[in-house]
Amino acid sequence: MYLTVQEIIDLAEFSGLKVISELNDEELETEITIGADCNGIEIADDEGVIEKYRAVARCDGCDYDELQPLGKPLYV
């Protein structure tokens, strides 16, 4: 699923959070790919330790093509 930064802000505010953004209109249209899997998505940290997360995000067009974990790791 793709969400723009603006849609993520809207979701956060719908969830009761207050978001202060200094991004311009073009930056607000940046798409973030959200992936989820009940069995977990594996991500290795800088030391090579692998953890599983239910949901992850990736910024389309950003400098680094890395996954950002969302929430706490799953304990299997």
Image (cartoon, rainbow, N blue to C red):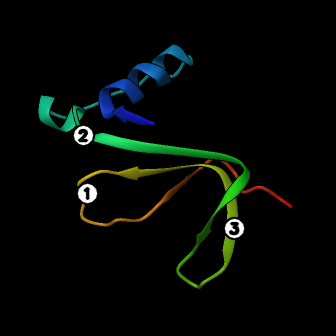
Label 3 amino acid? Glu
Would you say the residues marked 1 and 2 are in contact, meaning their CB atoms lie under 8 Å apart?
A: yes
Element at label 3: strand
Choose the circle earlier in sequence order: 1 or 2: 2
Quarter of the N terminus within the rendering? top left
Label 2 amino acid? Thr
Element at label 2: loop
Choose the circle earlier in sequence order: 3 or 1: 3
Choose the circle earlier in sequence order: 2 or 3: 2
Residue 2 picture location, percent across and down: 39, 36
Mark 3 Cα-neighbour bin, 10 Å: few <14, some 14–19, many ≥20: some
Question: What residue is shown at x 71% (from left), y 55% (from top)?
Answer: 40
What residue is pinned by disc 3? 51
Question: What residue is shown at x 47% (from left), y 60% (from top)?
Answer: 67
What residue is pinned by disc 1? 62
The circle on residue 27 is none
Element at label 1: loop
Residue 43 picture location, percent across and down: 59, 68
Label 1 amino acid? Cys
Residue 59 picture location, percent across and down: 34, 51
Quarter of the C terminus within the rendering? bottom right
